[in-house]
Amino acid sequence: MYNAKAYSAASASSPLASTTIARRDPTETDVQIEILFCGICHSDLHQARNEWSGFMPTVYPCVPGHEIVGRVTSVGSAVTTFKAGDLAAVGCMVDSDGTCPECLAGFEQFCHNATLTYNFPDKHTGGVTYGGYSDSVVVDQRFVLKVPSNLDLAGAAPLLCAGITTYSPMHHWGVTKGKKVGVVGLGGLGHMGVKFAHALGAEVVLFTTSPGKKDDALRLGADEVVISKNADEMAKHAGSFDFILDCVSADHDINAFLSLLRRDGNLCLVGAPEKPLAVSAFNLLFGRKSLSGSPIGGIAETQEMLDFCGQHNITSDVEIIPIQKVNDAYDRLLKSDVKYRFVIDMASLKTEA
């Protein structure tokens, strides 16, 4: 084991603060990474404050962070895919059993024995996993990803969660040229959804309740912006969408968007509202429409997404902060006061005593 610098939450009510954590020395299949940037995901805040206690209670101290980009510092003797000096990334998972039907099909995100990047039982140390709000991390080579060299590293960090969360359902549901795609909400997820749908060649319509977001949506690649509170604007698009990506985590009327789908159209949830959404059966029955949900993707699909981003020069729009500002960032995140993701510059951690 070795000591690493990190920021952790000591309890649900305490601010994140500087600490030292124990990391395992690399085994023969491990990659050790100096973390350069780590994105801040809304789930980091939920976990740090134990807001998911009902199904994923937080174990303290908690070191969040699963949008990790860095540089390889050492590799185990059996590692063949990385060498010291390579750019590398780690997302929401750091292990799985590798033998179940889901893993064998390349869907590690659905493995019942997967190990998440933080706040999950650590089969190596016996404690829990610690995330990317740290100066380094050690991960099995199977869960380490290659970062295209042309991408801005800070902007690439959120691709490991926000990026794959929006790319995966578009990939699965066949978004391509000639398709009409809607994106509901222009936040951390939604702005990536607009970028991907545009790069995939689709006609892209952004739905928002905020007229002030129109110019930004058009800049990001939307062909049209619809104010979802305007019934006339919504009615113009009735029965016309092949696919709608719903990125909203607040309570909202999902039926208003189901009615916009064409026959065999799909609405996919990637936002996670706290309360169940009321769905009218008739909005599904007439038109054979479907309602689905999607989390992150598997490792192969995440690498495919990163390569696609490299080809199209896609990164997240980010605000870079020093780690000492992480608690301020959490407060601003609650107010949606960021365009569109916070990313921590881990060089700031070196100034900690």
Image (cartoon, rainbow, N blue to C red):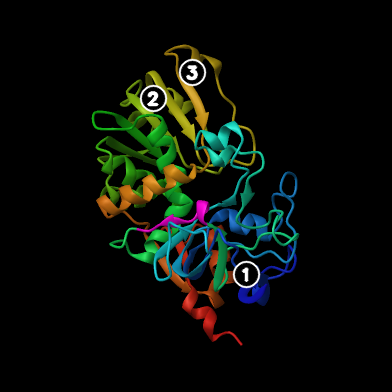
* CA distance separating discs 2 and 1: 53 Å
Image coordinates for residue 33, horizontal then vertical, percent: 50, 68
Other residues around mark 3 within 10 Å, as few (<14) / some (14–19) / many (≥20): many
**Residue sitting at x 62%, y 69%:** 25
Image coordinates for residue 51, horizontal then vertical, percent: 70, 52
Identity, as a three-letter code, of the amino acid under mark 3: Asn
Q: Which of 187 and 140 is in front in this view?
A: 140
Q: Which quadrant would residue 5 be assigned to in this image?
A: bottom right
Q: What element carries label 3?
A: helix
Q: Which comes before the other along the chain, label 3 or label 1?
A: 1
Q: Which comes before the other along the chain, label 2 or label 1?
A: 1
**Residue sitting at x 46%, y 53%:** 160
Identity, as a three-letter code, of the amino acid under mark 2: Leu
Most distant residue in the front direction: 77
- For the question of whether residue 353 can be seen, the reply is yes
What is the total number of numbered labels drawn onto the structure image?
3
Q: Name the residue under label 3.
A: 283
> What numbered label is drawn on residue 25?
1
Left or right side of 68 for 119: right
Q: What element carries label 1?
A: loop
Identity, as a three-letter code, of the amino acid under mark 1: Asp
Q: What element carries label 2?
A: loop
Q: Mark 2 points at which residue?
A: 260
- In this rendering, the answer to whether 89 lies above or below 10 is above
Residue 144 belongs to the span the image colors magenta: yes
Left or right side of 124 for 221: left
Image coordinates for residue 283, horizontal then vertical, percent: 48, 18
Residue extent of the magenta highlight: 141-147
Other residues around mark 2 within 10 Å, as few (<14) / some (14–19) / many (≥20): many
* CA distance separating discs 2 and 3: 9 Å
Image coordinates for residue 120, horizontal then vertical, percent: 69, 54
